[in-house]
Image (tube, rainbow, N blue to C red):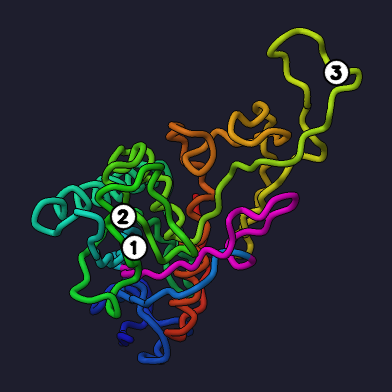
Amino acid sequence: MCGCNADGPGDGGVPGSPPGGTTGGTGLCCACPASGTVDRDGHRNYYTTTGYAGSRPKTNKCSIDIVRTARAGTVTVSTAFHMTYINTATAAADGSTVTSAISTAMTNWTGGASAYKLKIEQPGCDPQELTIVFTSTTAASASAADVQVTVDGTSTGPSSVRNGTRMTFKLAGEGSSASWNMTHETGHTFGLPDEYSELTGVPIVPAPTTPGAPTITAPTPAPTTTYIGAPPQANVTITQQPWQPSPRTPGMYMFDNPTVMGKYGNTTYPAYLFYWIAIEVSAILAAEGSPSVVTII
C-alpha cells in the first residue's frame, strides 16, 4: 500500500490523490504500484461452457505486477516454471529448448495483447490505460513453481497442459517446441479453456453410398463458451463451428473456433482472452482498499 497527501489530482507530490480526497493511506494513490498472486480455477471464474467440458479444471497460478503513471502504465503477468527431465531428456542438453519455447509463447501472448489495453478507473483518479505484458521465470524448486513441467525425451504426441499447472513437454512430440503449440498450451496455464471439441455425430440417413463420403453430420446445438467480463464489462459467448468428422475417433464430429485457443495454427487473440486479467487486477486493487472499474479495451 502507498499513501498520498496531495489534495487533488493536480496538486503535486505523489501523482494523484487517494480515493476520497486527503485521507492518505486508506487506499492506493493514483500512480501507486500494486501486486498480487493468483491461484484460481478459470472454470466458472473466467469462463463457463455448454455442450462440452473445455478440458476443465484449469487452475491459473501466476503473479501480477501493476505499475502506473497518471494515465498509463504496465500490467505484467509472470509465471514461474520448474522443469524435471525423464526418458533421456536432461537439463544440460534440453533445458534451453524448453525455456526458449516457453519464452517465445509468452512473447506471442504479449504480441496478442498489444491490440488492447487494461483500463483502470479508480475513484479520484484519471482513467489509466495499461499495456499488458507476459513473462516467464524458472523456479528453483517444484514447490516454488506456478507450473511444473515434465520434459519427456522420447514420448510422441503433442505437448499438453493438465489442470493448468502441470505441463508435459515432449521433445519428440508433434510440434512440441513449435511456436503455436506452446502458445496454445501456455494459454491453459492462464486458466483458459480449449475452444474446440469432439461430439457424437448424427448419422446421415440413408447412409451415403459414395466411397469415403461422410456418414455423420454435426450435432446441434453447437458447443459454446462464455467468457466472464469484470463488471461492467459484458460477458462474451462464442459458438464453436462445425469442422469435420473426426479422423481419429469414428462417430465423433469436430468443432472449433478460429482463435489461438481453438483452431490449430490460428493466431487470433480476441479481447475476451484477456478478461481474466481485468478480473484479477480488480481483485488486487480492491484488496488494497481501492475498488476500481477494470476492463479490457
Q: Please state the horizontal and vertical placement of residue 269, each as a whole percent of the image.
A: 46, 41
**Residue closer to the observer: 65 or 109:** 109
Q: Does 54 appear in magenta?
A: yes
Tag nearer the camera, 1 or 3? 3
Highlighted magenta segment, given as a residue range: 44-66
Residue lying at 54% horizontally and 40% vertically, measured from the top left: 262
Distance, label 2 to label 3, CA atoms, is 52 Å
**Residue closer to the observer: 28 or 70:** 28
Q: Please state the horizontal and vertical placement of residue 181, each as a whole percent of the image.
A: 38, 41
Please, what secondary structure does the residue beneath circle 1 have? Answer: strand
Report whether 229 appears left or right of 253. Answer: left
Sequence-wise, the earlier of marks 2 and 1 is 1
Q: Would you name the residue on which mark 3 appears?
A: 207
The single residue placed furthest to the left in the displayed view is 92
Is residue 114 visible to us here?
A: no
Q: Quadrant of residue 126?
A: bottom left
From the viewer's perspective, is residue 216 above or below residue 193? Answer: above
Q: Please state the horizontal and vertical placement of residue 278, each as a whole percent of the image.
A: 49, 63
Distance, label 2 to label 1, CA atoms, is 6 Å
